Image (cartoon, helix red, strand yellow):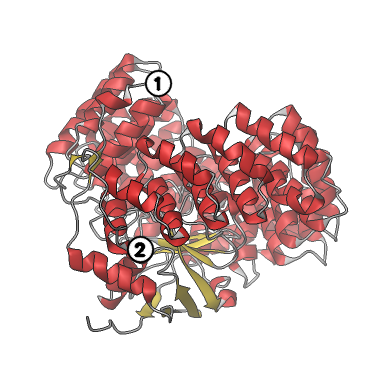
Amino acid sequence: MRARFAAAAAALAVASAFGCAGRNPPPNAPPPAPPAGGTPAPAAAPAPAAAPTEARLLELEDRRAFDGGVLSAAASDPSPETRARAALALGRIGDERAVPLLRGLAGDSSAEVRRQAAFAAGILGDTALVAALAPLLADSDAAVAAQAAWALSVLERPEAAEALLGALSRAASDRRPPLLRALWRYATPEAANALLAHAADSDPQARAAALYALARKPQEASRAALAAALADPGTDEDTAALCARALGILARPESIAPLWNSVDASGTRAPVRTASLLALAAALEKTPGSSLLEDAPPRLVALSRDTNPNIGVPALALLRWAAADREGFRRLWSVASSGRGRRQQVALTASMAGLGERSRDLVDASMASADPFLRATVAESLAFLPAADADARRTRLAADPEVVVRLRVLEGLRTPADVTRNRGLVDAALSDSDPGVQAAAVAALGQLEDPASLSEIRDAVTRSGSATPAAPDVAIEAIAAAEAHGSEPAAREIVDAAYRHPSVLVSRLARRSLVKKFGADPSAHPWRTYDAKSPEEYAGAAALERESALPVVRIETERGTLVLRLLPREAPLTVRNFLTLARRGYFDGVRIHRVAPGFVVQDGDPTGTGNGGPGYEIRDELNTTPYETGTVGMALAGPDTGGSQWFVTMAPEPHLDGAYTVFGRVIAGMEIAGRIEQGDRIVRVAVPPERAP
């Protein structure tokens, strides 16, 4: 399944580390699932006499089945714990019929029930709940108010922004940080003015929250405040790193000097230096004619030798703009021609970008390499060569026996002109033996404005549904392409075809698109539900939740060992799936296929392409646990597409909250995680033995 969280680094081979701006992070997904015989959502049943068991709620969540009787009984149970659990289930199941129940739970006498109802409203994503959430901003319980602010941010409605701004104007100082942070999704002048008013707040938490919101979706009006915060040694390192990232997104020539100062200063903290290196690359990429400062090349050469990959790898990528410097050129050529691993790949991309056609000998030598990941790097970076040179080499690489190479050929087609010139190989890729390559071909066709290409995508969806097994990859990518062409009648036809797909996952994603993007009548498009697992599996997951000792896992890598504590109370089915795979030895010897400096380390794909997985999908178990440094989450290519790929965050990442299942935390070895380089391998994953039933 094609990854969205783990977007490829086209120009610099490290740009994915720059953040999750655009289509969703961390983290990609499993390959084809076997066909599942889904059934229509059941009609509401009479309320049972007793509250449902945890196993029953887990089953409904896992099937994405809305059983009105069971859920109503749980939502009205005398126990606040049961009502809070019901609220979470209503959000996870994701059916709009949950709205009336969540409205009621938002006014519950229990603070924990109200908090879970606010979270559920956010993950359900139904804007009809804005009115129920707004009063919670003034809740007597601070945790409830903070969760409501998060949910109103997620819903992204003008009336939600008004509620947040109004609450901010009345809030006591200790209530402001979550309100400020929640404004990041609202790139309006009113939100920017409110945030700028707190960008120099005397309260460090309020200041950090305001700067976070300004930096996540930066506007030109905030550039001076962001640059000032970056230069201020009193700014905490996570906030300063975000400010650097924001300056890279804004990509103004005036930002190059402050970013370089942040790189070059002797006292710069490592996370801030990493972010500044990445931001410099982004700014230079987006401002043709800009250049590094004169004294930069020697310093970059030195930084490119840093043993910390979060410094060395971005510095190598930045040497692209120092290829005319003798020492910069020598360093790049040396690593690209005789280095190894990720650093060689990054140096090769930087050489191709900096030298253009003068890198042809290096390119051809790399194409002859026995290393498929080096050949894949060439495939992905051919846009830096003249079109004729690039297209001739694409034709050769498109026939490569390795999936990762064929995949990167298609991902390297960055413009409609590239796709048009290489239309033959794109059309051929629609029949590739690998579903991920087929999906990449669909993504390439989606760049074109030609209505005929939409018909070709629709036909690809239909073919994918008749394949054995019916892989979801093509249809998922086709839905994204259709949404980008929403005004075309043929775009709706693509999503209609996906709704009829035999994969329940695909049908549900298409149903969501039809209702939210194409204005379809929800009643005319009932949700399909997944088949149930065995009762023993749900009972086992419920028992795992109740265990007093949380499972501890040791991830032994070539660089050292990470120790994780798993969180079955927050995500029992996800934890059970991870432990099952680990006990099978699934992760042992697997290549760590993604390291995004300062962001995530990601693993769990035996193919090393970013598309691989166990051959099935698991449902998301979104929960209120925040993404802090060392949080372990499930990587996705869309809702409910997890399987085996997981990631560890290298810094706090609040924008991932409620979007990716949190199922563990690193409790030892974060310094090891910081030394891991993309392409390193996991030696083994040691887990506690399975308990006897």
> Which quadrant would residue 542 be assigned to in this image?
bottom left
Which residue is labeled 2 in the image? 574
Label 2 sits on a secondary structure element that is helix
Residue at 22% x, 38% y is: 43
Q: Earlier in the sequence, mark 1 or mark 2?
A: 1
> In the rendered view, does 203 fall on the left or right side of 529?
right
Rendered position, 365 above or below 386? below
Measured as percent of width and height from the top left, residue 197 is found at: 84, 40
| Marks 1 & 2, CB-CB < 8 Å contact | no
Q: Position of residue 248 (x, y in %)?
A: 69, 43
Compared with 568, 668 (above or below) is below
Task: Please identify the quarter of the rendering in which residue 476 is found.
Answer: top left
Residue type of the residue flagged with mark 1: Gly
Q: Residues within 10 Å of mark 2 (few under 14, many from 20)?
A: many
Does residue 529 appear left or right of residue 6 in this picture? left
Residue 486 disc label:
1
Relative to 187, say whether 174 is above or below: below
Would you place residue 42 above or below residue 445 in this image?
A: below
